[in-house]
Image (spheres, helix red, strand yellow):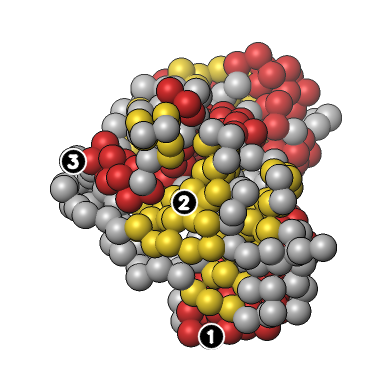
């Protein structure tokens, strides 16, 4: 029995011949070759047998009463229910017109009558080889489709998980606009993917102080978001009892120095597994009665202060990212927001998108766009930022997460 790369040749051949002695001769020859043979005396009988047996190869005479071989071939090839057998036409007609007609009907091969045993063997074995390859291809296609379906289901589950994670991330972010004493706050968040590695928040630190931070984990996507979640969790819960954020002072609890907070996070979230993860951030505290503030800049873009007279000032000295060097020392930066002054902190995704990391271009441009709106609320500042970012859409979709935290002190009446 012929085989093709481990796949056995098909076992069943349907012989269709109206001449009984010729039908027996063909059946005997194919039986000796190892095939299981079924036979029919005409086309209509062959259709019934094929629907039951699903023979892999059909050897049929052309000239038969009732349904001839040409019509039988056309019927078998046009209806997938018959299994698409390899069709060998037996014919004494060897002129080109007849051969073309047979091929147009779907015949795969021809054997001249009276057929020699050796020629029939070769033709049928060729058909068996083709059918074996077809069966193998169908098996491979079925396996591939099954694998693709599993991949699609996995992707759908992952997309659902990402959608839930994105919803969770947004639910953990603070309100886009808020007011505290004479201060207003505004935020903007546009992740590069479903979820991002940026995170920010603001919260009361006792009766007189406001704590705020914006952090940016290297990279974006799920891994960055998980680390951002973990870091942000350190600022949640009972702030008054958080020994990282509050310390004992001569007059009772007071906000801890921002540099000490960042140093604690640096130690807690060291890149000990060599994943290359680190984070930049600005963490600060501001007195909501006096406007006096202090922050720590850990490798993050410079905070921008917009004075009431429209002038802009970049604060800080850069610093180095957190999570990279054990025992790293961080510095505090003092500032003050007078009435009408505003503070804006951006992630580096904003700078990258606006000017390819060239902050010497970005900060003067933002000062011009934001400086004319002295006395505006933080939410109004964010709306201007959205407009500025929207004007850059010709550059395509941002490749990094975009986040903005704005704090504005009301102008003096």
**Residue in the picture at 76% in, 64% down:** 412
Query: Quick one: label 1 or label 3, which is nearer the N terminus?
Result: 3
**Quadrant housing residue 389:** bottom right
Q: What is the spatial separation of the Cα atoms under label 1 and label 3, in whole angstroms?
A: 37 Å
Are the residues tagged 1 and 2 within 8 Å (C-beta)? no
Bin the neighbour count of mark 1 within 10 Å (Cα to Cα): few under 14, some 14-19, many 20 and up: few
- Disc 3 is placed on an element classified as loop
**Which mark is nearer the camera, 1 or 3?**
1
| Residue 140 x %, y % | 45, 36
- Disc 1 is placed on an element classified as helix
Residue 165 visible to an observer of this rendering: yes
Residue tagged 1: 361
Q: Considering the image in quadrants, where does the N terminus appear?
A: top left
Residue tagged 3: 272
Residue tagged 2: 284
**Which mark is nearer the camera, 1 or 2?**
2
- Disc 2 is placed on an element classified as strand
Are the residues tagged 1 and 3 within 8 Å (C-beta)? no
Left or right, 378 with reference to 23: right
Bin the neighbour count of mark 3 within 10 Å (Cα to Cα): few under 14, some 14-19, many 20 and up: few
């Amino acid at each position: 029995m012929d085989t093709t790369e481990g796949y056995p040749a098909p076992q069943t051949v349907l012989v269709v011949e109206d001449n009984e002695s010729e039908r027996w001769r063909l059946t005997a020859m194919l039986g000796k070759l190892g095939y299981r043979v079924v036979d029919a005396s005409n086309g209509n009988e062959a259709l019934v047998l094929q629907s039951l047996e699903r023979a892999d190869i059909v050897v049929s005479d052309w000239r038969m009463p009732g349904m001839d071989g040409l019509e039988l071939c056309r019927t078998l090839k046009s209806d997938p229910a018959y299994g698409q057998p390899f069709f060998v036409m037996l014919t004494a007609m060897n002129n080109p017109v007849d051969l073309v007609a047979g091929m147009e009907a779907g015949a795969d091969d021809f054997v001249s009558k009276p057929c020699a045993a050796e020629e029939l063997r070769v033709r049928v074995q060729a058909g068996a080889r083709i059918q074996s390859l077809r069966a193998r291809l169908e098996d491979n296609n079925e396996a591939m489709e099954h694998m693709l379906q599993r991949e699609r289901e996995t992707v759908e589950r992952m997309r659902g998980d990402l959608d839930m994670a994105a919803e969770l991330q947004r639910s953990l972010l603070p309100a886009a606009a808020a007011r505290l004493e004479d201060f207003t706050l505004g935020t903007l968040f546009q992740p590069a993917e479903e979820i991002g590695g940026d995170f920010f928040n603001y919260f009361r630190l006792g009766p007189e102080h406001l704590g705020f931070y914006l952090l940016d984990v290297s990279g974006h996507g799920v891994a960055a978001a998980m680390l951002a979640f973990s870091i942000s969790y350190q600022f949640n819960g009972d702030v008054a009892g958080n020994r990282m954020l509050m310390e004992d002072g001569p007059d009772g609890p007071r906000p801890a120095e921002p540099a000490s907070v960042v140093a604690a996070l640096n130690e807690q979230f060291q890149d000990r597994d060599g994943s290359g993860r680190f984070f930049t951030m600005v963490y600060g505290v501001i007195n909501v009665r006096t406007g006096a503030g202090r922050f720590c800049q850990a490798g993050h873009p410079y905070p921008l202060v917009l004075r009431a007279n429209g002038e802009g000032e970049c604060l800080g000295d850069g610093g180095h990212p957190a999570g990279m060097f054990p025992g790293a020392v961080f510095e505090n930066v003092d500032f003050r927001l007078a009435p009408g002054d505003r503070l804006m902190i951006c992630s580096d995704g904003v700078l990258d998108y606006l000017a390819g990391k060239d902050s010497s271009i970005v900060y003067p441009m933002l000062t011009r766009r934001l400086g004319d709106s002295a006395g505006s609320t933080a939410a109004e500042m964010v709306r201007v930022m959205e407009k500025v970012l929207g004007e850059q859409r010709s550059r395509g979709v941002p490749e990094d997460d975009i986040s903005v935290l704005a704090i504005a002190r009301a102008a003096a009446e």
